[in-house]
Amino acid sequence: MVSTPSFSSAQLQNSPWLRQAEAAAIEADWERVVQTIQRHLVHLEDSGRLADALDVACFGHWAIAVLCEGDFQDRWDVAKLFPRLEALCPESCLKLLLDPLIALLRDEDADPDTRWFAARILGEFRQPAVLPALIHLMQASEAEDLRQMAASALAGFGKMAIAPLAQLLQGSQTRLLAVQTLAQIREPGIIQPLLQTLRDPNAQVRAAALAAIGSARDPHIAEVLIAALGDSSATMRQVAVTELGFRADLLPDYDLVSLIHPLLLDASPTVGQQAAIALGRLGTHPAASALYRVAHSPHPTDSLRAHLVQALGWIGTSVALQYLHQLALQWSHDLSAGALLQTTVQAMGHAEAPALRWQVARHLVELLHADLPAVQTAAVKQAIALQLGNLGNLDALDPLVQLATDPDLGVKLHAIAALKHLSPDQGRQRLEHLASSRQASEQTRQEVAIALAEW
């Protein structure tokens, strides 16, 4: 048990909360110790007065005792009280609060969980005196969770932490964590230190640094990102192409599409997928053309083709939608391409402008009328029905009525839902008209009867 400090009888007499905290600590009732401290803080807050030196010293002592002896919940609860006491603590007394925590943090014989809480609490203070202790913990500790907590605490210091973290970039054991910590500090001052790590032999260090500075509007960053497209590390290429996808501002000065295009067929599937996403974000006609050319070629896997199609859907221009229609027709001939065709239909449905929605509806109706093998799968018909219902084009009523007569129950139900969404009155009227039509086959009338029963 943590030793109890000695208080004079006068101090105990004048501070009932001290007597209560001491009594609870003697019984190792740490929950009650926390409650006693909290009540005293409420009293100080309500009275509008600052804590005196005795309050601060005693609070620090009992809080450290709870951190050392309490269970996780006790530690968690007492940790939340420190910011409240800081707000009540005169500048002259702050050292009384910080010194015990810093000493606990530096005590290598202390319980690691206790030190973890100490690091977490100290990170809330944003005081210069705390920085050396946290830096030392990052350098000296072999416990990864302690190092990570120290890094998280340091990141909260912002500009104050940049210089000491930059020093840690010199050590091979601390470089990666220092880069990751600097990455959390959204300040221009991190750029120069991190630029120096882009030639590090450790690809993980290079990639973390590039990800941290890739979005910066520094004039040197564009060239750095472009150079990284040719890095030997797939992770670096992935970070570079991802960041360039957000840099449409560079299009007037750099042909980003031509630079990114080759990475669509990168040896790393993840890089290829990110390249597709990047071109989708850039959203230009050349970007759509690049996506289509690769999707149309025999080289990509179906997985990559799905990403290329989705990127064209995000672009969502008339040109991109025309490319999707051409791909859909291409894949409709191949029964094994049903899943890819379904993805293409879904991507076409992302169109938002009324004129584009009309264009998509026309393409989907044409696809249905083409009567090609892959279009006849239930999953593709369901996807087409869903999109036709959402697009709001009444020209789709008749095709949806035909889908409502499909023998497959899933297709039928999707078509009914689409008709209800598009125009429930007209949809039902057309089904009823078809049910009474002498020109309809007996099989069709039976399917219509089922559809009306499901309506």
Image: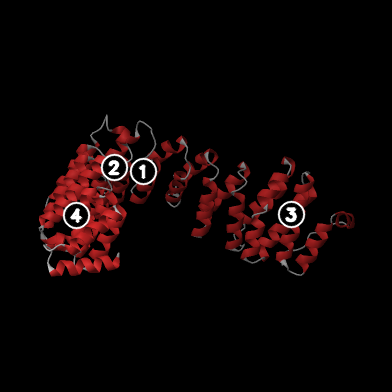
Instruction: Say which label, 3 or 1, has the lower sequence index.
Output: 3
Sequence-wise first label, 2 or 4: 2
Question: What amino acid does circle 3 point to?
Answer: Phe
Note whether 249 is above or below 427 in the view shown: above
- Residue type at mark 1 is Leu
The residue that appears at 25% across and 45% down in the rendered structure is 357
On residue 210, the disc is 1
Three-letter code for the amino acid on which mark 2 is drawn: Ala
Which residue matches tag 4?
398
Sooner in the amino-acid sequence: mark 2 or mark 3 = 3
Q: Are marks 2 and 3 in contact (CB under 8 Å)?
A: no
| Badge 2 vs badge 1, beta-carbon distance below 8 Å | yes
Which x, y percent locates residue 175? 43, 48
Q: Secondary structure at mark 2?
A: helix
Q: Which mark is residue 228?
A: 2
Q: Nearer the viewer, residue 140 or 50?
A: 50
Q: Nearer the viewer, mark 4 or mark 1?
A: 4
Label 2 packing within 10 angstroms: few (<14), some (14-19), many (20+)? many
Q: Position of residue 342 (x, y in %)?
A: 21, 58
The image quarter containing residue 40 is bottom right
